[in-house]
Amino acid sequence: MRINFAHLRESSTNGGYIDFAVFEANATNGMDSGRAEVLRDLTVKARLQGLKVDQSALAYAEYGQIRFYGSRNLVEYLSARGVPQWTHSMEA
């Protein structure tokens, strides 16, 4: 299965930068335990592709709305700004 994702770098509140990944994916069981496993696996795969990932999140549709699951600060950021444009894809 092909997974789209965005790999971005943004300024952090402490003056540095945060590199993050947002994956277009959800757990097949729809539970947070499954989402945590999917997020961990996709984050590892992105890092193995040579990408620096400080924080990561899943973006998925549920009940007709976009939801996010992952690092708290990143989820808050995405909730305010929406889903970024996909920059990469990988086989999962």
Image (cartoon, grey):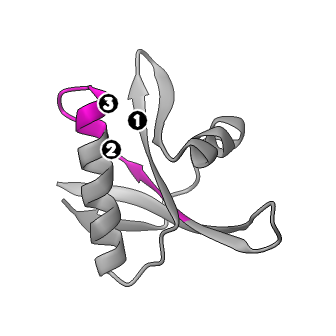
Quadrant location of the C terminus in the rendered image: bottom left
Quadrant location of the N terminus in the rendered image: bottom left
SS of the residue at dot 1? strand
Q: Which residue is drawn at 48% across and 70% down?
A: 53
Q: How far apart are marks 3 and 2 (CA)?
A: 13 Å
Q: Say whether disc 3 or disc 2 marks the residue closer to the N-terminus.
A: 2
Three-letter amino acid code of the residue under disc 1: Tyr
Residue furthest to the front in view is 14
Q: Distance between the residues labelled 2 and 1?
A: 6 Å
Residue furthest to the top in view is 63
Task: Please tell me in which quadrant of the rendered image residue 34 appears.
Answer: top left
Three-letter amino acid code of the residue under disc 3: Asp
Q: Where is residue 18 in the image (x, y as percent from the top left)?
A: 64, 68
**Was residue 23 drawn as part of the magenta stretch in this picture?**
yes
Residue 56 in the image: above or below residue 61: below
Q: Position of residue 91 (x, y in %)?
A: 20, 64
**Relative to 74, 63 lies left or right:** left
Mark 3 or mark 2, which is nearer to you? Answer: 3
Q: Say whether disc 2 or disc 1 marks the residue closer to the N-terminus.
A: 2
Three-letter amino acid code of the residue under disc 2: Ala
Disc 1: which residue: 60
Disc 3: which residue: 32
Q: Position of residue 21 (x, y in %)?
A: 48, 61
Mark 2 in CB contact with mark 1 (< 8 angstroms)? yes
Q: Which mark is on residue 25?
A: 2
**Relative to 61, 55 lies left or right:** right
Q: Residues within 10 Å of mark 3 (few under 14, many from 20)?
A: few
Q: Position of residue 25 (x, y in %)?
A: 32, 44
Q: Which residue is drawn at 31% across and 43% down?
A: 36
